[in-house]
Image (tube, rainbow, N blue to C red):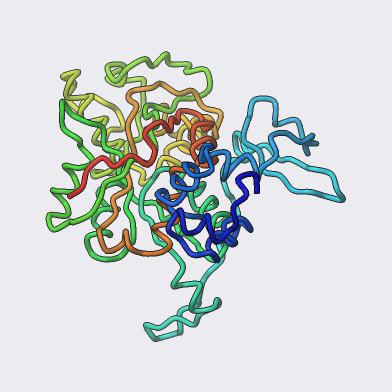
Amino acid sequence: MAKGWSQTQLADMVGIKRQAVYDIEAGRYLPNTIVAIRLAKYLECSVEDLFETEFFPEKEPITFVDNDSAHCSRVAAARVRGKLIGIALGGKHCLNDGLRPADGLLEPGANSLRLLCPPQQIDNTILLFGCDPAFSILASHLSRALPAARMHCRFASSHNALSHLSKGFAHIAGTHLHNKKHLESNVEIVKQLYPDFRGKVIAFSTLEEGFLAAQGNPLGIRSVKDLADTTVRLINREPGAALRVLLDDEIKKATIPPSEITGYSNEVSTHIEGAFMVCSRAAYIALGFRVIADAFNLSFIPVAAVRCDLVIPDDMLDHPIVKVIMDTITSGTFRLELGSLPGYESSQTGKIIASL
């Protein structure tokens, strides 16, 4: 309106249809990166001005249900009788302890599924394997951008996630191996486990990995060398997990035989299980992320900051929902929330690490 242009004129400049302009204005359609940049160029503003500030008020008074908001910036909110009510998403409240709804029920004695949802809902669902806890936040932002879209995030180690992807069981895999020397470890593991892969490796997050210890770190653990103390009981991750690879590399650098570490052969398959073991004092030290330590009110001893990447085959990059996911991870609102998580950083989010 300020430019004196019609929707048709703007659509012709940008190279899209007039209906697309209407849908963008109404919030029914999230354009891809190129269209967003072109719109910002012709309207002489930033992409954030078009797709954030206009749609989301900067501040609004909020009333919290309890006092858990003191040390937490992330909040779930709803309007109750006109009042904005907030629930802090810190500590135990950042984890979902409810039951996940099913898309269907397996027919007794048959390898067939009785759907509990419309078939088109299955067609609009993306399956992602990986172990970054922030994948569930991406799923939520995807649904906001495109309400018809869904993403199921299934926990899997980096090795297992790539294995599932190579077998055609997933649209996307997540991997977060730490780099060695000048090699991109996430790229190298794709080449190793998925030799025929053709697609892209795209940065998702940078997060802190290390040791989870009881609150206050009573045993004074400072580095992997302290694990050789016979009073320290470790709970390890399974072979193939990125945290296990990190630990083994650190042990090798410290020249400590694994046999000297109490609990080295005791394994759990998720960082949540490891956190429970420390909370119940079944172990003194577990492997995990800073965000998990924060959720369980545990002490965290950092070892490395690693990048979690999304591995997406070429044919999946053409999937309409995957295209929206790619736009979503580069959006300002998603990167803002991702960067607010304990131990997370989002400056590389959306960057293409490799094209294979």
> Depth check: 45 or 341 in front?
45
Measuring 49% from the left and 32% from the top, which residue is drawn there? 339
Nearest the camera: 144 or 100?
144
Residue 42 x %, y %? 49, 44
Locate residue 152, reporting x and y percent: 45, 59
Residue 245 location, x and y as percent? 23, 35
- Horizontally, residue 19 falls left or right of residue 232, namely right
How many discs appear?
0
In the rendered image, residue 351, in percent from the top left (x then y), is placed at 33, 39
Q: Is residue 173 left or right of residue 188?
A: right
Give the residue at x 15% y 27%: 182
Eyeballing the image, is 35 above or below 74? Answer: below
Most distant residue in the right direction: 81
Residue 141, above or below 119: above
Among all residues in the image, which is located at the extreme bottom? Answer: 109
Left or right of 23 in this view: 228? left
Does residue 71 sit above or below 195 in this rendering? Answer: above
Instruction: Give the image quarter of residue 111.
Output: bottom left
